[in-house]
Amino acid sequence: MPEKTLHPCDAYRIMLRDYPDVLNIEQMCEILGISTKTGYALLKNGKVQHLRIGRFYRIPKAHLLTYLIAFAPDILVTQNDVIEVVFFLHPTT
């Protein structure tokens, strides 16, 4: 039986379903698997669009999805790939 392919945007939405619509810097870094220092650099260099509220950064999930999709706009993702990544990000105990 052939695997169903998902558009990258749909795949990322599934992978990030447990996160709020607006992320803080720690959540963004957790998703990307990077340090907070690297996360702040992404924001300050304009790589990821964000909001600055006082001294806090807020990253709408849609902007993070845009950043992620920019790396692989033509990739075909299968449902099994998404399930594996979701399990990696949110393992069951």
Image (spheres, rainbow, N blue to C red):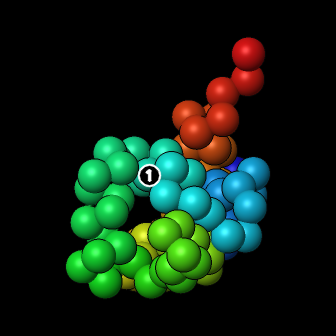
Quarter residue 89 falls in: top right
The correct choice, above or below, for 63 with respect to 21 in the image is: below
The answer to whether residue 72 shows anywhere in this view is: no
The answer to whether residue 86 shows anywhere in this view is: yes
Residue 74 x, y percent position in the rendering: 40, 80
Mark 1: give few (<14), some (14-19) or many (20+) Cα within 10 Å. Answer: some
Q: Nearer the viewer, residue 57 or 1?
A: 57
Residue 5 x, y percent position in the rendering: 61, 67
What residue is rendered at 31% in x and 83% in y? 46
Q: Mark 1 points at which residue?
A: 29
Question: Which quarter of the rendered picture does the C terminus lie within?
Answer: top right
Q: Is residue 60 left or right of residue 40?
A: right
Q: Is residue 86 left or right of residue 20?
A: left
What residue is rendered at 75% in x and 51% in y? 18
Q: Nearer the viewer, residue 80 or 62?
A: 62
Residue 29 x, y percent position in the rendering: 44, 52
Q: Please, what is the three-letter code of the amino acid marked with disc 1?
A: Cys
What residue is rendered at 57% in x and 78% in y? 53
